[in-house]
Amino acid sequence: MSSLRAAIIVLLATVLAVPAAFAQGAPGANRPYRIYAITFRGMTDVEKGFTDYFTSRRIPVQITFRDLNRDASRMAGFLEEIRQTKPDLIYTWGTSVTLGVVGPYDKVDPSRHITDIPVVFTMVAAPVLAKIVPDLASSRRNLTGVYNVASTEAQMRAMASYRPFKTMGMIYTPTEQNSVVVLDEIRQLSRKMGFNVVAKPFKLDASKKVTNEGAADMVREMTQQNVEWLYLPPDSYLNTQTKNLIIPAAMESSLPTFASTEGLMDTGALMGLVARYHSIGQFTAYKAEQILVHRMAASRIPVETLTRFSLQVRMDVAEALKLPPPLPMFNYAELLTPGPAPAAAVIPTKAK
Amino acid sequence: MGTIRFRFIMVALVVSFFAIGMAAFLNYFKYKSTISNIVKSRVLLVGQGIEGSVQASLQLGMQFAELSQLPQLLQRERQSDRLIRGIDVFDTNGQILYSTDRARVGQKASDSWLDAAQHAKAIEWATEEPDEFVAGLSVKNAFNLTVGYLALRYSREDVERATGVAGREILLAALGAFAVIAVLAPIALILVIRRFERDLSTLDAAASHLEDRAQPQPVTEGSGFEAAISSLRGSLSEANKSLDDLRARLDAAG
Amino acid sequence: MLEKQYLWRIYWRLAGVIMMSVVLALAVVSYFSHRVFERELVPETEQKAATVGNSVRALLLKATSFGVPFESLYGVDQTFKGVIEENKEFDYAALTDATGKVLFKYGKEPAGASDFFRRPEVLATLQGERPPWKGFRNGGQYFVSLPVASDKPLGILHVAIAPEFVNNVLLEVLLDVVVVLVVSLFFTLELLNFMAGARLASGLGEFAHQVERMRTGDFTATARMRANDEIGRLLRRIDAAVDHINVRYEFLVGELEDKLRKASGARREALKPAVAALESIKSRFRFGSAAKEGDGDEMNLNRIRAPLFAFILAEEMTRSYLPTYVNNLLVPIPGLSPQVVIGLPIMLFMLIVALGQPYLGGWSERIGRRKAMLIGAAVATIGFAGTAVAFNLYDLLLWRSLCAVGYAMVFVAAQGYVLDRTGQANRAQGFALFIGAIMVATVCGPSIGGILADNLGYRASFGVSAIISLLSIFAIARLPGAEVRTAVSQRPARGPRMREIVALVLNRRFMTLTGLAAMPAKMILTGVCFYLVPLYIVSIGNTTAMAGRMLMVYAVMMVVIVPLAANLSDASMRRDRYVSMGLILSGLSGMLLLLSESFLVVFGVVFLLGLGQSMSIAAQSALVSEHCKEEIRVYGHDAVYGVYRLLERLGNALGPLLASLLVVVWGYQGAFVAISGVVLVCGLLFTIATRGQEPVPEPVSP
């Protein structure tokens, strides 16, 4: 019975394989897949993860890297090159590059945007908010991708696992929609998880521009309002203010800080839940593999993020705050130290 | 011994044999599963330590196939528990990438391993080889894609020796219990059956004197049979009386 | 009947003694097992505690290596909590400093622990040549203590082994032991019947029969073989008495005839009174040889019980784990959800039994009941063996179909066997015996099957079923081969015709009873007991043995309640009210899952379901003849009952299908609730539809 089925499967496979073998120039065994990659600010670990994945899976690829270098005017040239070389897949890094190649879903201009070549985007913090996709489950367009921020709930839980809290503080830019959305989410979560939120927006000057004026005082006030954690949302303006202003003020008030992005973590926060760039790159390559090798339609591949984020703890900050990480965290957190790693502990070896 | 008594005792023995057998069976298998679980979880604990290190390396962007420190770690962990015979790490195709036995590197892991690992519902999996047990963990990357498997081989002999000892003792206890029952149950049964047998023997005695013309001795009270016996007796004596009558008339006729 | 009651009194007393011996034996086995468990498990558990402790120690040292002072570590209790929650063998963990002062702890502190931590021999583990770990015993408490030291001694980590851990392991077995006890009780009663009872009962029956015959003056001698036991001896004595009186009669008659032949005139006159006496004797008594009776059937009737029980047991044993087994063999079938696929083998089984039964009746009559049963049991044995080694779902379906065909054959042929050997008078008794064997099998089967599957695995358990089925073949082979026909069974059995099915399905009165009561009752039975319970119990992390226990609760309810309800429904209340109540109770059962998802609630479900089913089951079929007099007049009794049974059995097949579809949509709990909801609605509709009618109750006919 089973051998009969096997025979049928073999037969079917033969029938399907014949036309494929005759189709000349199809990528695969003889010709590598051609990928056209556009980065935003030069090569990062994401690209390394991306290429490493293909190497480890022994998938032959030929990747053409182009860098926008934060200059939107270069985009037109890249699009022209894409139209001429007709690659098998396009890789886009970040929100601006992605929007430059495919356009927002409600304003696609076929004469300018690429629609006939599958696109895989990466390092987009909020693809729905940026109007790249209408829905994470399906883009309904010839693209898919990976976003790089852990869910707000996962971040709240990570914070609570370090030290439980009743009140959390947050500083954000009122003109950045991204931060406003995150604040809404946090307010919803606070009801579910049972904590208070003290949110303070940066002040706007006379010309409605964001200023850092009084920001340090806002942090100091928080300690009087029983704030136990300062949450740093994915906020571009905040990113420029943490290193010199916000985090020093928090340290002064013995207020631990939680970073929502790797960038904020780098400016000296106590802890953060961040997506490793290398893993993001690998995941992006995995999605590309599904399109190139497994011939899945990009629109049918959901837009996702990592299932495992890296929990980072800055040990010198922990020591300064006298807030050592809880013991279980030593098992799974990435412990960052300013100096060289400490010597291995002496563990009595087992005789038995 | 009466055959009825014998049959009842046989019933008691068969049922006791079933019950004791099942109880011994249950205890033995409970013991076996408990001890295998204790040992397996102990081995897996070692595995979790290794998996944590592999995970940390993957997070740092190292490739699963390029974990240069892993062989030393495997060697160290194997020595930490005498039960563990070897540790292998293989990829999703079954190719062994790292092992405490250098000779195994590059070989294919057994198909049953790959099968057990792929079909496990959790990240933990287990399988058996003729001479060793295997417990393992799936290694998943940051986007929940399985990149490979960790397998810890541990001595079957050790586990089975412990099970064998317990099995023998449980078997002995069961045989002992059965022996006790084989002695006690018949005695207890005989006490109960005696009443029944007495009923039967009075019945028998009564039946053997059915044709006696003498005044019948009373049948044991409460056996439930006295009515039947006196009815029998009555029917017989009535028939006999009629035949007597016939005899008398025949005689009278000369 | 006097002698029956007398026998049962003896049976119960014997069963009591046997049960007491069994309990004693189980206690002995458990006691020794406990000793072995404690002696062998504790060292292994200590080893494990050492491994767990070792990884905690590594973590502690890692933290201190980052400069966290030993005393101001944070979240040590969280690590302990994880350890204790993941390993049920441990119930307490503590970290002390080098002087034995407790710094961190988690769990229930054992008595005297703080003193123990300060004992010199405990603190000594930290000094000099430090052992990796050391096991201590403090009262009844086992501790594993590990020294923690970097370049200097820091403290000691203690893991306590829960003292009740070994007891808990044995307690888990205890439930199964109770199941074994219940099953043993049923086995005992069944065996008393098989090994001693059947002969005893027929012997005593024969005795009563003989008494009755003689009371009416029948002294004809029966040339019967008597069993070689006490009762046989008794009967032989009676036979001897009868023989004697016969000889005496023959002699007297001979003498009289002789005299009459020789006599003449006056002599003849003198013999007149003797002739008159003989005439009177002849009118009151009968002598000579008895006409050969087709008797001894009661004995043969009883003999069907053993093979039937064994055969049904083989099938029942698989009930508690079959769906889970299928789940393991699952191959995805495109377009069908896995839940539905799991239900397929059960559905197919029920469907084959439903459709096969009406037509197998005639077949078994043609080729002979015994032969039909032999073939059926052989087919089923092949089916069980095949299921045990099934390659995947496809061949499993084939093997299960064989089991179903075999089941239907044996069931129908055994039914025919009983039918052949019973008259109008003892028909009910014959069926009680038939149903009794099946009931006991449903009590013993699923629970024992669940235990076996749990410990031996599914395939081996199917192997056991195959062996039991094989054994039943030998038991069937010992049945009398001669075919017997009574007046009732002379009528050839036939399956219902299409015309009758269509006419009855369109008949409102008939369908009220069949569609609203009989079919839903069967649907919830197979849907819940054969599909949902086994799968749900395993899905919430319980064992197949637990599923078996659940099914046993159901079966025990049936055994206990059905006879009660049957007696009551004849006496006190209208039968349709019993059916209504039964349906509504069944319909409420699944609603319990709304309260909680615990497996304890499932006990409530099967309890209510058993109660509901057993209340309605006896009344239901009697209602057909009560409510559908008109239809029976038109189509005949056989056709109406034939269609009724067919539809009822189709309900059996629909159960798993419906349940599986509901699981796809709403999950297990939703399916429990929904299927009960359907039955509840049917029950209410049935109550409304039968409201007001007050049919005259008729005697139950089987």
Image: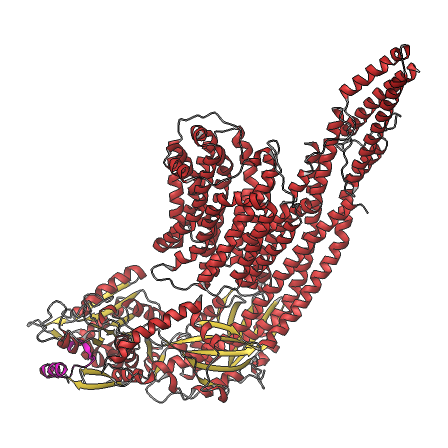
Q: Nearer the viewer, residue C516 or C491?
A: C491
| Residue C229 horizontal/vertical position (percent) | 78, 43
Is residue A84 inside the magenta stretch?
yes
Left or right, C340 with respect to C399, comes to left
| Residue B69 horizontal/vertical position (percent) | 42, 88
Q: Nearer the viewer, residue B228 or C154?
A: B228
Image point (46%, 46%), residue name:
C354
| Residue C167 horizontal/vertical position (percent) | 60, 61
Left or right, C375 with respect to C250, comes to left
Q: Main secondary structure of the magenta part?
A: helix
Image point (51%, 71%), residue name:
C94
Is residue C46 inside the magenta stretch?
no
Residue B199 appears anywhere in the view: yes
- The relative height of residue B212 versus residue C231 in the rendered view (above or below) is above
Residue C70 appears anywhere in the view: no
Q: How many marks?
A: 0
**Color style of the picture:** secondary structure
Quadrant in the picture for the C terminus of chain A: bottom right
| Residue A220 horizontal/vertical position (percent) | 23, 72
Quadrant in the picture for the N terminus of chain A: bottom left
Left or right, A347 with respect to A25, comes to right
Q: Nearer the viewer, residue C65 or B189?
A: B189
Image point (47%, 31%), residue name:
C625
Q: Residue furthest right?
A: B254
**Magenta region: which residues?**
A75-96
Residue A295 placement: quadrant: bottom left
Image point (73%, 35%), residue name:
C206
Q: Nearer the viewer, residue C179 or C204?
A: C204
